[in-house]
């Protein structure tokens, strides 16, 4: 049974950008368009993101970058019409909360110390 998309989810505020993108599968472009991530391939401090609409970007991992701030603060103008992000995913994204002192660290299961 799928989870309720309107249920609040809590994540820590200063999680690494790559873990946040891997979890949410969303990417805000510089023009404010929210894209769905089809393929995410980390390569050290950089990663290659391929969206559902076919755009390919090389991004850098940063907790304080524009894209990390926009994901945390839910700043976007519209969802990409070519990516066709489902409505339940946008509702789930809108219900996500970021707190400094409460929520998941988005750690890997095999890496409890990070």
Image (cartoon, helix red, strand yellow):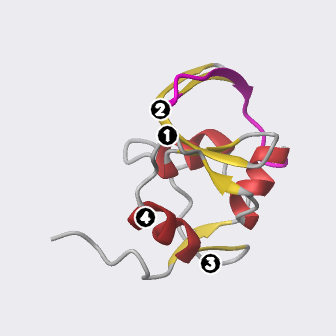
| Quarter where residue 5 is shown | bottom left
- Residue 100 falls left or right of residue 25: right
User: Does the magenta portion include 88?
Assistant: no
Residues at circles 2 and 1 in contact by the CB criterion of under 8 Å: yes
Mark 4 → mark 1, Cα distance in angstroms: 12 Å
Q: Which residue is mark 1?
A: 83
Graded by Cα atoms within 10 Å as few (under 14), some (14 to 19) or many (20 or more), the crowding at tag 2 reads some
Q: Which residue is mark 3?
A: 102
Q: How many marks?
A: 4
Mark 4 → mark 3, Cα distance in angstroms: 27 Å
The disc, 4 or 3, on the residue closer to the chain's N-terminal end is 4
Q: Which mark is residue 52?
A: 2
Q: Is residue 17 visible?
A: yes
- Residue 101 falls left or right of residue 41: right
Report the front residue among 18 and 70: 70
Closer to viewer: mark 4 or mark 3: 4
Mark 4 → mark 2, Cα distance in angstroms: 15 Å
Tell me what residue is drawn at x 48 percent, y 71 percent: 91
The disc, 2 or 1, on the residue closer to the chain's N-terminal end is 2
Report the front residue among 10 and 95: 95
């Amino acid at each position: 049974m799928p989870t309720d998309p309107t249920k609040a989810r809590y994540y820590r505020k200063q999680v690494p950008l790559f873990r946040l993108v891997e979890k949410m599968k969303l990417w805000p472009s510089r023009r404010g368009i929210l894209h769905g991530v089809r393929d995410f391939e980390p390569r050290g401090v950089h990663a290659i993101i391929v969206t559902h609409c076919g755009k390919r970007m090389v991004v850098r991992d940063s907790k304080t970058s524009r894209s990390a701030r926009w994901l945390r603060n839910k700043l976007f103008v519209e969802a990409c019409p070519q990516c066709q992000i489902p409505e339940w995913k946008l509702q789930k994204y809108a219900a996500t909360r970021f707190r400094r002192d409460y929520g998941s660290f988005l750690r890997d299961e095999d890496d409890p110390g990070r």
